[in-house]
Amino acid sequence: MSLRVDNLKVWYRTLRGDVQALDGVTFTVADGELVGLAGESGCGKSTLGKSLIRLDSRMRHVDGTVELDGKELPIWDSERMSSFRFKEVSIIPQYAMSAMNPTRRIGRLVAELLESRGVRPDGVRDELLRRLELVGLAPDVLDRYPIELSGGMKQRMVMVISTLLNPSLLIADEITSALDVSTQKAVAETLVGFRDRHFVKSTIFITHDLSLVYQIADSIIVMYAGRLAERAPTEALVTTPRHPYTQMLLSALPEVGVRYSDRRLTGIPGSPPSLLDPPTGCRFRDRCPLAFDKCATQPPFLEVAPDHQVACWKAF
Amino acid sequence: MLTLEGVSKTYRVGTFGGRELTAVRDVSLQVAPGEVIALIGESGSGKSTIGRLILRLTGVTGGRITFGGTDIAGFKGKGLRAYYAQVQGVFQDPFSSYNPIFKADRALELLRQTYFAELDARRWRDKVEASLDAVRLDPGQVLGKYPHQLSGGQLQRLLVARALLLDIRLLVADEIISMLDASTRIDVLNLLGDLKARGLGIVFVTHDLSLGNYISDRAVILRQGAVVEEGPVEQVFGRPQHAYTRSLLASVPQLHRKWEPGDGLAGEPAGGDGG
């Protein structure tokens, strides 16, 4: 087991109280597994991604543990986490387009980054050039400033930098949402390539786009309002979803070939609850057509089929 | 109703405006009442520029745009106001379409000052409630609220309601659902479908092919400012003639159908952008 997250709770401090953005999340990621983490805005997927590498000043670790390759990650202690970042856990941030220091040539930026982690840049230079070639970038990008690269080139450069030290866990946070469909496909496939070539051991791919994650992930986790709703192997999640939220989300996706005049799709009425003072029990209950008395108690996250877990009383 | 004849738009770019960038080249198309035209393209394809030209937010460099037979470039003052009473736009980011320091319904109130100054308070309120009803918003939930208190879907529907107050005949919808969550997206799309049934013409600008397909009658595929392929939606999506359309369709992630090796644009991942 590469990554083991147990009952992780990370809340945001605000003037009006704690926002329970991540409220008791438990899952594992196997060696070589590419897990898709899907959900709508505000469901806590980015909070989960950030928690595994760096808590910002508003985030507070409330409970739970994270274990990577058998070692506990001290996620609440930013200084101790420092020795894991980049080497063991790495991230391709949502803002990859603006992640590089605009005042440095890219080669120098990479060298400084490596030195700050106690790695001699000369030692990895050959590997760096090899990987640039792999993603279709010429070696002379290292002599250029970030502003001289197009959006897609920057995206690929950041992907190479993030994975240069072969981290055990890579977090890719919405890295394709700002891209065109053709570039999107290239970036998604590069990510799979990195895994296949063992540049990274396991990957968490965070996205709001279920049809994109379906293309590349081994398994998919669906989050809702700070908790896990369902997790299953990709094919099972898409063909036999067990959580009503997953089912409704999937049926709300327009696909090429589906026409309004032939088949009218429906959305999910209502909106997610406020996480400042979340309701007790199942958090989807107010929008759920199947809700009954028992939903006032929080459903556990249980396995209903091999590797298929769900948090819904109706599914057990 | 709306006709574009050989429309081009060239921007001056660079520090001193020394270089020229042709955003739209020689585009001709027509929109009839009750018809939805999808303008589909990747970034830089000129799809949004066409929307802006129709709304006269910027002028054409070549060709002409006519509405009901009249060239829209000639509209001034009263004439332009009459044009905007029939043609309105809604844009991608509902959060930045409102002034955050005022209540959201100020967007409606401003319209009243320009177009409905003679209406008394009660008739105005009835009119507002009727248009909110058409976009399935509960007046009690949205009126008197600040933009940050409303969800993206609510704000976007409020903008459509604002356009409906004017009894418009053509709506330019520029990426209006890309910022919305999947569960609320489809509601806004269905809303457009209902409006179309009431005779509204819609120019639906999008980069997402599956959304362009859902409500549109005709699709126009754009690449670098020029029309690559145009026709009824079933034909463009079902039997695409142009290689670019085919590769674009193959790149769209779809449920129940995985990407195949060799799909998409040639030369990936090296390609995909111009450098």
Image (cartoon, coloured by chain):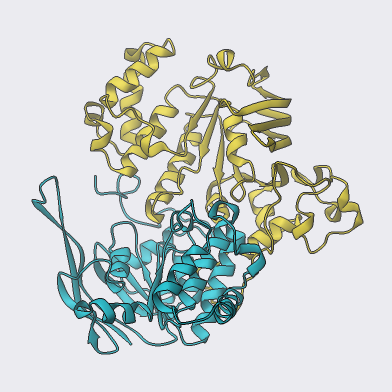
Q: Quadrant of residue A54?
A: top right
On-image quarter of the C terminus of chain B: top left
Work out whether residue A176 or residue B73 is closer to the camera in this orientation and state it.
B73
Q: Which chain is painted in yellow?
A: A
Residue extending farthest to the right is A293
Q: Give left or right: position of B63 versus B152.
A: left
Work out whether residue B251 or residue B142 is closer to the camera in this orientation and state it.
B142
Q: Colour of chain B?
A: cyan
Q: Give left or right: position of A279 versus A66.
A: right
User: In this picture, is B79 found above or below B43?
Assistant: below
Q: Position of residue B226 (x, y in %)?
A: 23, 68
Residue extending farthest to the left is B18
Work out whether residue B44 or residue B89 is closer to the camera in this orientation and state it.
B89
Q: Position of residue B191 (x, y in %)?
A: 55, 74
Give the residue at x 69% y 56%: A246
Q: Position of residue B15 (x, y in %)?
A: 13, 45
Res B204 seen here: no
Res B34 seen here: yes
User: In this picture, is B150 found above or below B81?
Assistant: above
On-image quarter of the N terminus of chain B: bottom left
User: In this picture, is A262 found above or below B179?
Assistant: below
Give the residue at x 58% y 59%: B182
Work out whether residue B72 or residue A20 is closer to the camera in this orientation and state it.
B72
Q: Position of residue B13 (x, y in %)?
A: 16, 52
